[in-house]
Amino acid sequence: MRYLFIVMLMINAVCVSAQTAWQKKVLKDMRPAIMQRAKWAMQQQPQTVTSYRCVRSAGGLHDFYSEGDYWWPDPEHPDGPYIQRDGQSNPDNFVAHRQAMIRFSRVMGALAAAYMASKDRTYLQHALKHAKAWFEDSATRMNPNLLYAQAIKGRVTGRGIGIIDTLQFLEVVQALRIMEKAGAIPPAELTAFKAWFTSYLEWMTTHPYGKDEMNAANNHGTCWVAQVAAFSLFVNNKPLIDSCINRYKTVLLPSQMDADGSFPRELKRTKPYGYSLFNLDAMSAICQLLSGSGNDLWRYTVEEERNMGKGISFMYPYVKDKTTWPLAHDVMYWSNWPVAQPFLLFGAAAFDNEAYYRLWLSLDHDPQEEEVLRNLPVRNPVIFL
């Protein structure tokens, strides 16, 4: 038994060493781009949900609000409940809170990456200002729930699937972990930040909306696990961390991935290419966050040899050459994908695959299209290595 324990420690040490080597490689190759994004981030001042108000929201000033993307006015009943057009985003929806959250995520990720590349604590000091505005300051903080996300006019004031909007907090909370390790968060602020995420985790795991999202059979269920995993690591909630590991092994991987490595539920959508990339990115984030200490989710395999290696192998050729994609083109934003998908870098580090890394390096690392930014919550994957 003692021998097995020693072997597991040695394997874990090798994995950590490999991740560190890839991190150094990325910081060297991407340093100019990292520092350029940080220059932009240093110029940004905090803006939270309190900066914008929508009269259609059933919530208050501090409540996050968004509207269902694919819901439109009914031409036959202009004043009636909205109707659905799957895959087609309504340009008249209220998106200011989502945009503010994406901006916050971009700022925090860019500043954390710049600190890793330079060790200049000025970047972390600026990140602290943004985090205090969102999670501590009474005048600007966001309430730790998503009761009013993905509302539909005339139908619902909020929905469980709205929880996917806080996927933007993945890089935020990873930046906070880096800041905590660097001693860059004063004790009072650290307590406030962890209290916020503890409250949000409580809501995510007990409210009917949270339970609905957890049980979603597609990318929404994946993103719920990715969020709970990231937030639980920050507040050190071991039971929830273990629950996420178990859910990946027993629910997400076996129920979502087909024998060829594809995700059938995503392929059935009107944007099969983009959704496939998105779900693979989210699953890769789970594996990156939760693998370690003898628990390698990257190589965890279920029936028919389904694992993350096969999932990446399925999508890699279509990222390398999108013209080979055998299915229908996405109804919107087809030309905007792929970009520097994080699954390529995470996969390169996990499987020591130089081809994945070279492809990741060659793609767009700073997309500006709003829909791409929304569906690319991990834009600085180096901070997760």
Image (cartoon, rainbow, N blue to C red):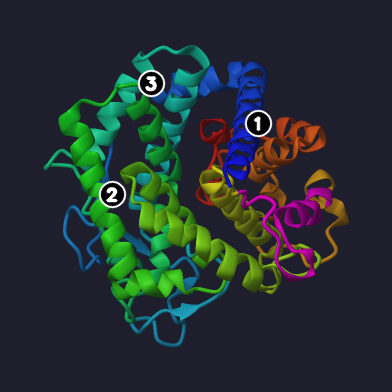
Residue 42: percent from left, percent from top: 38, 21
Residue 216: percent from left, percent from top: 50, 73
Is residue 6 placed above or below 89 in the rendered structure?
A: above
Mark identifier at residue 52 = none
The magenta stretch spans which residues?
Answer: 296-317
Q: Does the stretch in magenta take in 300?
A: yes
The residue wearing badge 1 is 14
Task: Work out whether mark 1 precedes mark 3 in sequence or the reverse, and give the earlier one.
Answer: 1
Mark identifier at residue 197 = 2
Figure quadrant of residue 158: bottom left
Tell us which disc is closer to us: 1 or 3: 1
The quadrant in which the C terminus is found is top right
Residue closer to the observer: 19 or 111:
19
Q: Secondary structure at mark 3?
A: helix
Separation (CA) of disc 1 from disc 3: 36 Å
Separation (CA) of disc 1 from disc 2: 32 Å
Q: Residue at x 70, y 54 (%)?
A: 308
The residue wearing badge 3 is 42
Task: Work out whether mark 3 precedes mark 2 in sequence or the reverse, and give the earlier one.
Answer: 3
Q: Secondary structure at mark 1?
A: helix
